[in-house]
Image (tube, rainbow, N blue to C red):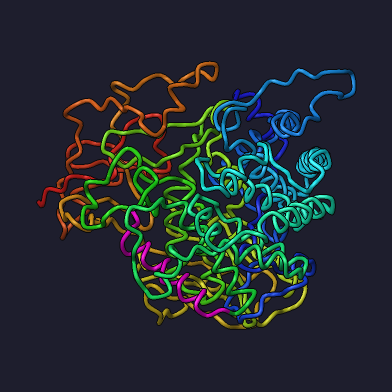
Amino acid sequence: MKRKVLTMWAAFLAGWGSMGFAQSVYPGQYEEKFNVKTCVPMAAECFDLQDVRLLPSRFRENMERDSAWMVSIATDRLLHSFRTTAGVYAGREGGYMTVKKLGGWESLDCELRGHTTGHLLSAYALMYAATGSEVFRLKGDSLVSGLAEVQQAHGNGYLSAFPEELINRNIRATSVWAPWYTLHKIFSGLIDQYVYADNRQAFEVAKKMGDWAYAKLKPLSEETRRKMIRNEFGGINESFYNLYALTGDERYRWLARFFYHNEVIDPLKEGRDELGTKHTNTFIPKVLAEARRYELEGNTESKSLSMFFWDTMLRRHTFAPGCSSDKEHYFDPAQFSKHISGYTGETCCTYNMLKLSRHLFCWDASPQVADYYERALYNHILGQQDTRTGMVAYFLPLLSGAHKVYSTPENSFWCCVGSGFESHAKYAESIYYHDGEGLFVNLFIPSVLDWKEKGMKVRQETRFPASETTVLTLSMAEPVRTTFRLRYPSWSKDVQVRVNGKRVKVRQQPGSYIAIEREWKDGDRIEATYPMHLTLESAPDNPHRAALLYGPVVLAGALGTEGMLPPAPDSDPSKYNDYYTYDYHIPEGLPTGLKWDAGHPENSVQRISEDGLRFRTADGVTVLPLYDVHRQRYVVYWDIVDN
């Protein structure tokens, strides 16, 4: 991505922010489109997408870079493989069109081609709902129109960038990559286009796809079903649950249940961690479908297994930045340190864990869920994107001396590129929640909330995490009695809260919410200061391997660029597409040791910048937030030397 393109779009997009994606419940105007509503009580509800705007911050900068990249991709290039497969590529106005083909996972010889188009349908819908900018609506409309043409050419409701024979191979249980995974992305994108951008054509295309799937799968035997779903299918069952909720059509619920993976889900019902060495991102979406099932059907087993899985992930299978997996797979937690590798933290896993966390928070309003959300959002998702180019990383490597490996604008299109388009468009989705009594303030991100139900606007201004203080300023026409619940993070203590300059006594403990109930008036101001401290988080199997944190922020030692290969030009993407076996050429003797004085951490690591988070170890290594370390080597899990 050329810098001038990024600059142009950053300027165009200045002045507006991003909203979130109502994953667990579809509130307000979006819920009106659903024939089957959520049937279980919710402890918290999310806001409509247009109700929150990001103010200037690193989050909005990332969002603007994401916007620039997604808008720069020509619609005809995204549709090329769909049209070629359907035989409708020729005969365009003016004769044959010469379209520069996309590379990487979108190339014509890749069995996963088409998944990026699905992700972008979702991302365009999110951005349109968040901004009202017509460019995102038009991009989505043009994609949907092209896909409808392709579907019509197939004649049976089928729609994909690859031929239906890949589905047939899956049904026969013969070798094929993951065709239903790709269809899941397309289904989700079409549904998002309808829900958030009100694209009725997208809804019709999705229903025809659902009709095709029902006709295709209904005649199959149970033996065939069990064999075919051993192949990765993403969250296709979640999409079918959502299509069922939109339409009330029982055929789509049948399809959702068809993809219930007994071998994976049944042990979770019994509270058994049998994750073994399974593929992590194949696993998480199956639980997401169960979470959606609980909301639509009230199935308490689905709720219990979802919560058990989430808790198991955090206790046993999650690294300090909130990410999981080594080379995309689970591993024995008893050998945790052996798996601190250059291939940890597949970004799609964190993307899906945040979606699951959103479900769980709506159910129980747990501050522990909010703590995890913050940890993973700051340390992994925010840091996935290269601040210079807008490109994104597949893995978050935690091997000492490794570095992030970024995508290219036209020749990567990995799964984590697709989920990245969405992730960087929806930073604001979990800043605020509400219930019948008041407001939850979960994240300390500069933003403005328009709480229409109360006739109140809440403006949050902060430099967190560089600063410990966040300020909420309220504006309204008439006084409003309600409760503000300020999250009291588990990483802080001795929090100070002031309302209009007067100190409020805080009786709550870390890992809870500070509740302030009163009649609020225009101009009222809430100021909360959350002291942050340096801490170590040890590897479960080795107390002498540990990550360094400041509050919720994982700090990384900057180790320079010795031996690093220059960034691969997009015309020669082979080096940078080798993300799975990438050779980091780590030089010997890098300073990865940390002398630690447990009683006085400030003697071990000193802050050297008041304006930003910049530290230095006793041995002279500069330490920065992991999300700020780009294009150089780093260390996250230090070799701890007790002082």
Q: Position of residue 603 (x, y in %)?
A: 18, 50
Please determine whether, in this image, residue 432 is positioned above or below residue 86.
Answer: below
Q: Nearer the viewer, residue 80 or 345?
A: 80
Q: Nearer the viewer, residue 221 or 430?
A: 221
Q: Residue at x 86, y 23 (%)?
A: 91
Per the image, is 318 magenta?
A: yes
The answer to whether residue 313 shows anywhere in this view is: yes
Residue at point 47%, 31% (across, down): 406
Residue 496 at least partly seen:
no
- Residue at 84% x, 50% y is 201
Would you identify the image quadrant in which residue 138 lies? top right
Q: Quadrant of residue 43?
A: bottom right
Query: As rendered, which of 402 and 630 lies closer to the eye?
Result: 402
Left or right of 36 on screen, residue 324: left
Up-down: is 187 above or below 558? Answer: below
Residue at (79% x, 66% y) in the render: 33
Left or right of 117: which side holds 401? left
Give the residues in magenta.
299-319
* Dominant secondary structure, magenta: helix
In percent of width and height, residue 298 lies at 60, 80
Quarter holding residue 21: bottom right
Q: Position of residue 393 (x, y in %)?
A: 46, 37
| Closer to us: 217 or 436 | 217
Location of residue 551 in the rendering, given as x and y in whole percent from the top left corner = 36, 58
Q: Is residue 221 magenta?
A: no
On screen, residue 225 versus residue 401, left or right, reads right
